[in-house]
Image: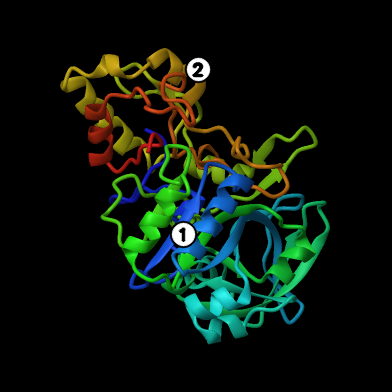
């Protein structure tokens, strides 16, 4: 069981949770694990053309925010040397206008970005405030908040910016190809198949797909449920988290989570009850042997602050869910990233889902 999805007070975070547009729109996103591969990008663009669709290449990353000011006065800032992670999406203005409306598009420029309402509420931000973000080389760059808009409009991303704004940060991480306005659903499905995109190495999300039990939450929702930390990237590429968040959110060390499935992990205090309940049910069902406890104790542990191993760098990428101590890894050899099919028993997966977890195997 990898990222955690919302149930009661548990949560999970992953970039692909962002919907981009309100649920009513017919839209397809094509992507892969990590930065978008060039062959998948080209195949998706070809498929979009065949289906008569409009499309854009979405860029996305987690950026470091070092201050929020209003009329020169500090509204929010992290401890010195630290930053707040901000989930960020980059879309061209024509796509923003088509998918989110001309009001949102009009609020974007080289010097202005859009912030989601939930994110703004976490930091007391409002339209007209100024945020400082770090470019890929660590240079601070200032942006005005051009608008604060509902999360349903932005698709859940914390910050939305134009390509010209992203250029100021050297944010070049391609994330997905987004398609809309196609002839019909059958046409886009046929085009995706013809271009070899229906594959275990490619992820396709359609706005009309049935509920995905392994869907996860975006960064803003995770912060709201698990608290917002400040982080620092050290000279060796490791990540440090501010001590105040650690003290409020984590036990002092690894804890034994179940007497039969003897996993020891240091997990977020909000996650532990659901994790214990899932392991209790796995043990009661006689499925304890389906979890590689040695592997989980060696490679899991929940808390491991770092950038996702699929990120391009430690400057612009995505913080791993382990940074929030919200994910636990097991069976990482037979169910490794990209393994198809993964070997974790589906009965165990279903039990974890019942308790609010999503499975990384899908």
Q: Is 159 situated left or right of 328 in this image? A: right
165 or 297: nearer the eye? 165
On the image, the x and y values in percent for residue 58 come to: 58, 61
In space, the residues marked 2 and 1 are separated at their CA atoms by 31 Å
Callout 1 crowding tier (Cα within 10 Å): few <14, some 14–19, many ≥20: many
Residue 108: image quadrant is: bottom right
Residue 309: image quadrant is: top right
Rendered residue at 50%/44% (across/down): 248
Name the quarter where the C terminus is drawn: top left
Mark number, residue 298: 2
Residue 129: image quadrant is: bottom right
272 or 114: nearer the eye? 114
Callout 1: helix, strand or loop? loop
Mark number, residue 18: 1
Contact, mark 2 vs mark 1 (Cβ under 8 Å): no
Rendered residue at 46%/19% (across/down): 333
Q: Earlier in the sequence, mark 2 or mark 1?
A: 1
On the image, the x and y values in percent for residue 292 come to: 37, 16
On the image, the x and y values in percent for residue 326 come to: 44, 40
Q: Is 352 situated left or right of 14 in this image? A: left
Name the quarter where the N terminus is drawn: top left
8 or 317: nearer the eye? 317
């Amino acid at each position: 069981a990898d990222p955690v999805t919302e149930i009661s007070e548990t949560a999970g975070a992953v970039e692909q949770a962002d919907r981009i547009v309100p649920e009513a729109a017919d839209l397809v996103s094509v992507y892969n694990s990590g930065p978008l591969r060039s062959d998948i990008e080209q195949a998706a663009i070809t498929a979009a053309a065949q289906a008569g669709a409009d499309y854009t290449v979405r860029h996305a990353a987690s950026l470091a925010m070092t201050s929020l000011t209003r009329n020169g006065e500090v509204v929010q800032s992290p401890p010195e040397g630290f930053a707040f992670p901000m989930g960020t999406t980059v879309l061209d203005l024509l796509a923003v206008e088509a998918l989110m409306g001309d009001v949102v598009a009009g609020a974007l420029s080289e010097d202005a970005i859009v912030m989601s309402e939930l994110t703004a509420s976490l930091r007391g931000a409002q339209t007209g405030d100024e945020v400082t973000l770090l470019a890929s080389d660590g240079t601070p760059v200032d942006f005005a908040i051009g608008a604060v808009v509902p999360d349903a409009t932005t698709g859940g991303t914390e910050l939305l910016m134009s390509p010209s704004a992203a250029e100021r940060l050297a944010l070049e991480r391609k994330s997905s190809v987004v398609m809309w306005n196609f002839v019909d659903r059958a046409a886009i499905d046929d085009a995706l198949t013809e271009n070899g995109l229906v594959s275990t190495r490619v992820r396709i999300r359609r706005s009309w797909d049935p509920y995905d039990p392994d869907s996860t939450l975006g960064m803003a929702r995770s912060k709201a449920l698990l608290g917002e930390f400040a982080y620092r990237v050290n000279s060796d590429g490791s990540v440090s988290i501010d001590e105040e968040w650690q003290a409020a959110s984590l036990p002092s060390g690894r804890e034994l989570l179940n007497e039969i499935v003897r996993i020891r992990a240091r997990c977020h205090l909000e996650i532990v009850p659901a994790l214990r309940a899932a392991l209790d049910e796995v043990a009661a069902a006689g499925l304890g042997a389906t979890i590689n406890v040695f592997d989980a104790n060696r490679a899991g542990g929940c808390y491991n602050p770092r950038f996702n191993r699929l990120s391009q760098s430690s400057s612009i990428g995505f913080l791993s869910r382990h940074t929030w101590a919200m994910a636990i890894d097991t069976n990482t050899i037979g169910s490794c990233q990209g393994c198809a099919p993964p070997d974790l028993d589906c009965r165990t997966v279903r039990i974890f889902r019942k308790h609010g977890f999503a499975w990384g195997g899908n």
